[in-house]
Amino acid sequence: MAKATGVPRMPKRVYEARVPQLRADLVQMQVALQPAPFSVLLVIAGDEAAGKGDVVNILNGWLDPRGVETTAFHELTDEERERPPMWRYWRSLPPRGRLAIYSGGWHGEALAEDPRSRRELADFDHTLRRLAHFEGLLAHASVLIVKIWLRLSQDAQGARLRELEADPDTAWRVSPDDWRSHRDYDRITRLAQRMRRATHRPGVPWHVIEAADSRARNLAVGEILLARFRAHLRLHAPPAPISRPRRVVALRPAGRRRLQALPLNQRLAETDYEAKRDKWLGRLNRAVRDAAERGRSIVWVFEGWDAAGKGGAIRRLTSAIDARDCRVIPVARPTDEEKSHHYLWRFWRHVPRAGRVTIYDRSWYGRVLVERIEGFCHEEAWRRAYAELRDFEEQLTEHGIIVLKFWLQISKAEQLRRFRHREETDYKQHKINAEDWRNRRQWRAYEAAVGDMLVLTRSRAAPWHLIAADNKRFARLEILKTSCEQIAAALEEK
């Protein structure tokens, strides 16, 4: 844990002499940040009356406002309350090349819960692990996180509160809660220390600054930000091009064997399909409405081979769901905006509100499939992604979101037949291109990667459902039945 920085009182003339150079250096930092392959998150947290707001305002005056974003997290909105807790932090992240200042950060909200009982402290510790994991994800993606804790002694805090109250222009800033916190200083300090210990990690340490002297405090914050940025910039020059791996070797061969063992010879006559389809569509409609009435949202994830029938399956699903409550997210190559954020950012953005439905046509699993095979990310990144994806889905299911994941499996011969049919059918020619044929030539590599994905990202709350899809009617009906059964099972659980 970083030790507190003891700072003596600073004369005004010394402060005014040092500020111009610091301001110039900070603006130059913003210029150097623009082409850098990372963003900077500056978290200003600390004890009550330590001057968090003053520091944020000072920094905004020193920096070029065109390259900085300032965020403070207030009371949860209805939109935020209906999603997993980390959603509002993910959506606030800046793109590469920009600096964001967080007043209080995501840590302030955890502390505001003011845990006291053993159970509340256990929940508090769970939240802290989530925050540490969040920061770790960003740090692995080269984001620079600078965390500042402004510390005041109890005596200095009391003096500061009395000073603010004595001035009519600042008296509004002192509330009865501030004085209650002051009287409970020791317990709150221990809680803050617990928080800092749990979220202090290599690459994302806490910097504790004595805040009794506002001039020394302001300079210390600016200088720490500059020092961390310069060190980070040296370590994170634009990365070298990623070479495509020569051969994809299965990490878990059992996954590939499971895939290959799936019987694909099921058949379903059209008359039988139509008779059963309407029954299951009706059940699905009732299941989705039942989930909505209970405030439970649903996320469908569709992955599968090219031409495996994902689009047709999704169309059957959506025909049973009120279009006003459902969004289909087709996942293609990331846009420039999406590339400038952590790869999970674009998926967090589309997490549905309570009672709503989101269907992903391809998903976050691209990181361990196409990105792994095509070499769009380093090996360290896609290997790390298995745990990251499990954690992402765990956060969804912990919040009560029902996650349904389907892999549509077809034979290589059936894919070839469908590819040729697409090429020969005018209104289907847009569905086939050179990339589809190139992917087909890498069948064994994808088979190994899919097998690894099935084994390494399975969980009780969000299992994979393998669908034999050589027969489209059988596959669509199986997806409808499985969806109904899984939603009903999830609603029965406490």
Image (cartoon, rainbow, N blue to C red):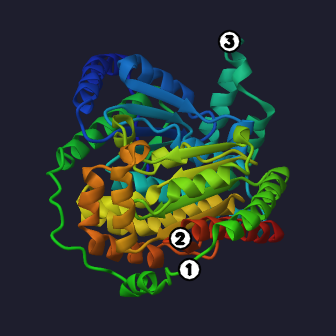
Identify residue type, mark 2.
Asn
Label 3 belongs to which residue? 169
Frontmost residue, 259 versus 432: 432
1 or 2: tag closer to the N-terminus: 1
Label 1 belongs to which residue? 266
Contact between labelled residues 2 and 1, with CB atoms less than 8 Å apart: yes
Label 2 belongs to which residue? 471
Identify residue type, mark 3.
Asp
- Residue 188: x and y, percent? 67, 51
Quadrant of res 42: top left
**159 with respect to 238 (left or right):** right
Frontmost residue, 321 versus 196: 321
Q: What whole-number distance in Å separates the C-alpha atoms at marks 1 and 3?
A: 77 Å
Identify residue type, mark 1.
Gln
Identify the secondary structure beneath mark 2: loop
- Residue 222: x and y, percent? 35, 31
1 or 3: tag closer to the N-terminus: 3
Quadrant, the N terminus: bottom left
- Residue 111: x and y, percent? 65, 50
